[in-house]
Image (cartoon, grey):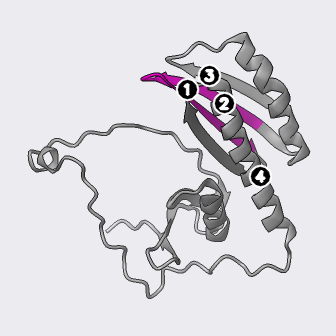
């Protein structure tokens, strides 16, 4: 297991690393195929934010917590990550579970655009500000696996590379509680 530490507007102290190392190594008790763990410590307006990303056998889990103390933030984020790992293991081990709803784009109306604009004046004047850019590794998987990954991360959508159709697709949670799949087409 490879462990990476990164600081954003923050210096990683030896105290933080000494606190984190044994706790991160304990993650292998929950899941033995962990390839990489990335711990990012950030400071902004007096808050200490810790983000832990775990990559294991095609699985990507993320937990983020914020408090006044970097060690408390780390412990809370690690607890959240451990809960996600346990939930994943339970789902994988439970062979009698009902499968995640079958995703289908056939006969399904396209998703309606949702307006959630903070500064409508900026949009009207033609100013659109992208506040954050993220890179996301695309791993080949089925739509059902992508939906499971989305649920584990606690997100409302998940971008993935469909192993069968060999194209990038997006699975999302619908307002009615179901799932939707967006398949790109040119034209």
**Which residue lies at the image location 50% right of the left edge and 60% below the top edge?**
157
In the depicted structure, whether residue 33 falls above or below residue 183: above
Circle 2/circle 1 CB separation < 8 Å: yes
Task: Tell me if 173 is positioned left or right of 120 in this view.
Answer: right
Q: Earlier in the sequence, mark 4 or mark 2?
A: 2
Circle 4/circle 1 CB separation < 8 Å: no
Identify the residue at the far bottom of this view. Answer: 107
Mark-to-mark CA distance, 3 and 2: 17 Å
Q: Mark on residue 26?
A: none
Q: Position of residue 33 (x, y in %)?
A: 86, 45
Mark-to-mark CA distance, 3 and 1: 18 Å
Number of other residues with Cα within 10 Å of mark 1, as a class: few under 14, some 14 to 19, many 20 or more? few
Mark-to-mark CA distance, 4 and 1: 26 Å
Q: Which residues are magenta?
A: 36-55
Q: Mark on residue 85?
A: 4
Q: Which secondary structure class fits the magenta region best?
A: strand
Number of other residues with Cα within 10 Å of mark 3, as a class: few under 14, some 14 to 19, many 20 or more? some
Let me know if residue 1 appears in the view: no
Image quadrant for the N terminus? top right
**Which residue lies at the image location 66% right of the left edge and 58% below the top edge?**
152
Mark-to-mark CA distance, 2 and 1: 8 Å
Mark-to-mark CA distance, 4 and 2: 20 Å
Q: Nearer the viewer, residue 79 or 141?
A: 79
Q: Earlier in the sequence, mark 3 or mark 4?
A: 3
Identify the residue at the far front of this view. Answer: 68
Q: Earlier in the sequence, mark 3 or mark 2?
A: 3
Residue bearing mark 1: 68
Identify the residue at the far left of this view. Answer: 125
């Amino acid at each position: 297991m490879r462990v990476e530490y990164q600081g954003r507007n923050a210096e990683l102290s030896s105290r933080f690393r000494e606190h984190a190392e044994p706790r991160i190594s304990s993650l292998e008790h929950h899941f033995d195929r962990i390839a990489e763990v990335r711990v990012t410590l950030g400071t902004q307006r007096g808050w200490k934010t810790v983000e832990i990303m775990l990559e294991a056998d095609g699985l990507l889990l993320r937990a983020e917590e914020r408090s006044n103390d970097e060690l408390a933030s780390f412990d809370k984020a690690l607890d959240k990550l451990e809960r996600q790992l346990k939930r994943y293991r339970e789902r994988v081990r439970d062979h009698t579970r009902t499968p995640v709803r079958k995703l289908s784009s056939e006969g399904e109306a396209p998703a309606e655009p949702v307006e959630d604009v903070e500064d409508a004046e900026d949009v009207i004047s033609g100013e659109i500000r992208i506040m954050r850019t993220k890179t996301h590794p695309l791993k080949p998987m089925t739509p059902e696996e992508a939906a499971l990954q989305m649920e584990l991360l606690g997100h409302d959508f998940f971008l993935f590379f469909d192993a069968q159709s060999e194209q990038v697709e997006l699975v999302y949670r619908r307002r009615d509680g179901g799932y939707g799949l967006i398949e790109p087409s040119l034209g």
